[in-house]
Amino acid sequence: MPKVKMPRSTPALDMTPMVDLAFLLVTFFMLTSSFRAPEPVIIDPPSSTTEKQIPKQVFMVIIDQEGRAFVDITNASVKMKVLKKMLAQFKAPGLTEEEVKQFTGVGPIGLKMGEIKTFMELETTERTAYVQRGIPYDTAASKLDKNELYYWAKFTKLEAHNDYKERENEAKLKNLDFDKSNYIQFAIKAAANAKYNVIQDIIEVFREAKVKEFQMITGLESGPES
Amino acid sequence: MAEIQQSGGGNDGGKKRAKKQSTRVDMTPLVDLAFLLLTFFVLTSTFSKPKVLRMIFPEKLDQDNPQLKRPEVKDGLTILLTGDDKIYYYTGSLKAETEIIPTDFTKNGLRKVLIEKNAPLIKILKNLEMELAKANETDTATTNRIQRESKQAQQESKLIVLLKHDNEATYENVIDVIDEFLITQIAKYFVVEENLAEMETELLKKLNEQ
């Protein structure tokens, strides 16, 4: 019997469908994912069953389990204006225009106004190592002028209102639709194991700054089984 | 590249033919890169966006204006939160003989108590919801009426729930309780800013000693 000769050929695999799929997934993840700004603290918020989405624009106070307070403002132009007002209020060393611009990208900040200049002069890589001790928020009425968190909230409320009016006027001039939901809302993101007394102090600061409505940021929990 | 032409090279009549070149492209590096990117995005992306609980606190009471005093709660439910994730409740106003009852955060604990207390409002809201489900979506008059009625029912609800806490209570516990309020559709609840009253602390102590 003659030997059956197998044709010699390299085992080639058609990878086209696989590549198609891989790129489809890559595109999907690239478009859906949003990057988180580096956070100085990792917060594990409690969970709740609400389905309300986080507002587009927030002034967020972050509380870690030791009670340190950090603030972040998602709107860059408001953040810059508030920062300038804060520096003037507390007579802190001023920042250059470049540093002010950079400040909008650093994410949540937990520093006294006096420290911000030193912090901004650091290299980007050195900033993560800088220990942030939190923004002072002594709620005693006599110490209100030293309560930096109160001024953060107060100035943000003012600037947020100005920003809203500005955009409304602009939309009116250009005859465009105005997105009314797009205003800065106040939010608290606190660690689940933080003491409630601390959160209450923050709420007091908000109330002092005439902020009555705010959002508590929580993780998602499965709905109630009935 | 991916495939090497095995045939050819034979002597076929001495005629010189242009070698048939394979049009295949080696896709291995491409696939490598694609999967590398894929893995990166899968691992870094976060899916569940955080949710929010809306809170409204009344304006600060003016110390000099005695007219703005907090109304006394006569026939309400008071929930006490203490450290170690403990939770208690009592009904009515606080007296020396008030019975403080311990409960827990599970479905059969706090939620059962709240559903029992809030039964009238839950019933009204459920009926309205059923009506809304039956109603035609385009019938705005009916949907508006149902919305108005449910709002009115919430405003007229007699049940007032107070949430009090001591120094050791954690944020998580408070959020859990507020979440239960939302689930059981409590219309009027307040998170009290002061710590537990002295009498409450003593009653709790007595309860724990037993």
Image: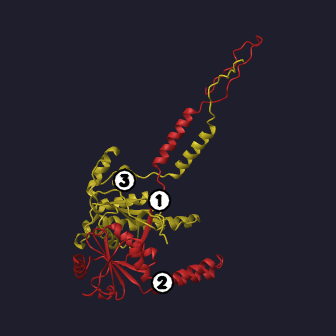
Chain colours: A yellow, B red
User: Depth check: B57 or A127 in front?
Assistant: B57
The residue drawn where x is 32% and y is 48% is A128
Mark found first going from the N terminus, 1 or 2: 1
**Mark in the foreground, 1 or 3:** 1
- Label 1 is found on which chain of the structure? B
The residue beneath circle 3 is A39
Q: Are marks 1 and 3 in contact (CB under 8 Å)?
A: no
| Side (left or right) of B32 relative to A62 | right
The residue drawn where x is 52% and y is 84% is B124
User: Depth check: A187 or A94 in front?
Assistant: A187
**Mark in the foreground, 1 or 2:** 2
| Side (left or right) of A122 relative to B2 | left
Image location (x, y in percent) of residue B127: 56, 82
Residues at marks 1 and 2, CA–CA distance in whole angstroms: 32 Å
Image location (x, y in percent) of residue A148: 29, 64
- Label 3 is found on which chain of the structure? A
The residue beneath circle 2 is B121
Q: Amino acid at mark 2?
A: Leu
The residue beneath circle 1 is B49
Q: Secondary structure at mark 2?
A: helix
